[in-house]
Image: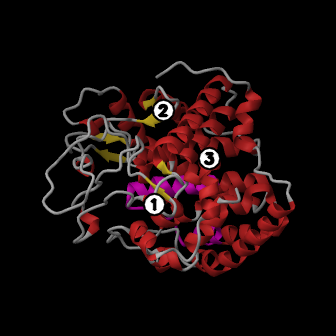
Amino acid sequence: MKAFRVLPIVLALIVFHLPFANSSGWAAENNKDRTKSIDLLWRQVVTPYLNDDVFREPYAYDSSHALMLPMIYAFTGCYESRSWMRRDFHEAFSRFLESSSPYEFKNSQIKSQFYYFSTKYVSLASECDESDKAVMRLARWVEESLYAHWTSTPIIHWTEKYRLKGVKGSLEWKLSNSAVTRSYYSAIVDEELFALAAGAELLSAYSKRSTAFAPFLYEITNKFYSTIRRYGRFLPDGGWLFQPGAWQDHPDFKYAHHQQLEPGLEPAVTEGISWDSSHSHRMPLLLKSLFDGLSATGNGPAALEISEVIDGFRLQFEMHVLVGAESDRDGLLINNYMDGGNGVYRYSYQTVGNNLGYGPYQLSGIMLEGWFALAGSSALKCEYEELKFPLSRELLDIYVGPNTSRVRHPLVQWPAYFTNGFAELHAQIAASI
């Protein structure tokens, strides 16, 4: 990993906390119209969605994704005008906690993901000093559950040869076994990233409340930091990639060199290929949680290093992933891979049914559900501002792609998600934060 430049702490803080501003009368009026639109769309989709039981399997996977931007919008600034939005989340989490017994997730990835979503809620609610008892009850539930997940949940390795003890055991095995027979055997997976980020975010939340935290949260935060240093790579143009080459042997990536989707493709591997853009949408927020966790422990130098990583990720996205206005393609589009590659992804994957896989640009739908908007890209913000609804048929077909056979709640099931107001709400929020 390249040597980090030392930045003034003030600049690092500006990266994350400077609000977007435009003093012109036109912009003020435009923002007023957008706020009205967000309010209407929220009542149309978010309130009924949160009123349902979406924090349990199988729906928790999607709710933890689709609700993240709305939740951040509701709590940012602690505005009184958005208190009713925050109330939707307070009531939903209260109902979750009031269930007859603590909920146990069967799917370990969904478990890690929901832990992270919950810690983000705890952190945001702590900033607004709201729903105090329920928030602390949720924090303690996550802390206890995360500790078990970190230290003792059985983790089965890809080969099924190793039975690893907890996310901690899995990470330690990977960090000490780089010489593997297949590249992805030592790749960091979603379950591990979410657990790491949940620990860092919860540590940050406790710090905001001046609440003592368990030592294992400090351990998780430091492990997250060492993992990013080990697996991250800065490029000569200033961009940053996470674990390039780690997935090149995996079946999902074996056809990435093909630039067109068609029957009968033979494997064509791209040497040193980066992670796909669909999974990578989470990185801006996960890295921000690491920054906050390190800052809460007083580790300023490490936090500054991560601020550079976030800058590098944003540059990588703008330079190589976001398809700009100079393209002959209409609408908000991204390339399929974080290194700028736009080849085939997940050819003949199990959840794409009778479809062949994802062709060029067909991971772009994540832009209206994921977290790339939190990377701080002004270029991307402009793209969201210019995106028009209803979406064209051509753009809708690209966004939905081969779709998935995974069970989803009706409000977030594709293609309905793109036409019922949810995707439009996401775009409006992304253009305003």
Label located before the other in sequence (1 or 2): 2
Identify which residue, 228 or 307, lies in the foreground.
Answer: 307
Q: Which mark is residue 228?
A: 2
Judge left or right: residue 257 versus residue 77.
left
Residue at 65%, 69% (x, y): give it. Answer: 94
Q: Secondary structure at mark 3?
A: loop
Q: Residue at 66% x, 68% y: name it.
A: 89
Q: Which residue bears the numbered disc 1?
A: 329
Q: CA distance from mark 3 to mark 2?
A: 21 Å
Would residue 221 appear left or right of 17 to someone viewing this image?
left
Q: Do callouts 3 and 2 mark residues in contact (Cβ within 8 Å)?
A: no
What's the residue at 87%, 62% (across, down)? 25
Query: Which label was assigned to residue 377?
Result: 3
Q: CA distance from mark 1 to mark 3?
A: 20 Å
Give the mark toward the camera: 1 or 2: 1
Between discs 3 and 2, the one toward the N terminus: 2
SS at badge 2: helix
Q: Nearer the viewer, residue 91 or 346?
A: 346
* Amino acid type, residue under disc 2 in the picture: Ile
Residue at image x 81%, y 53%?
22
- Percent from the top left, x then y, of residue 386? 62, 63
Q: Nearer the viewer, mark 1 or mark 3?
A: 1
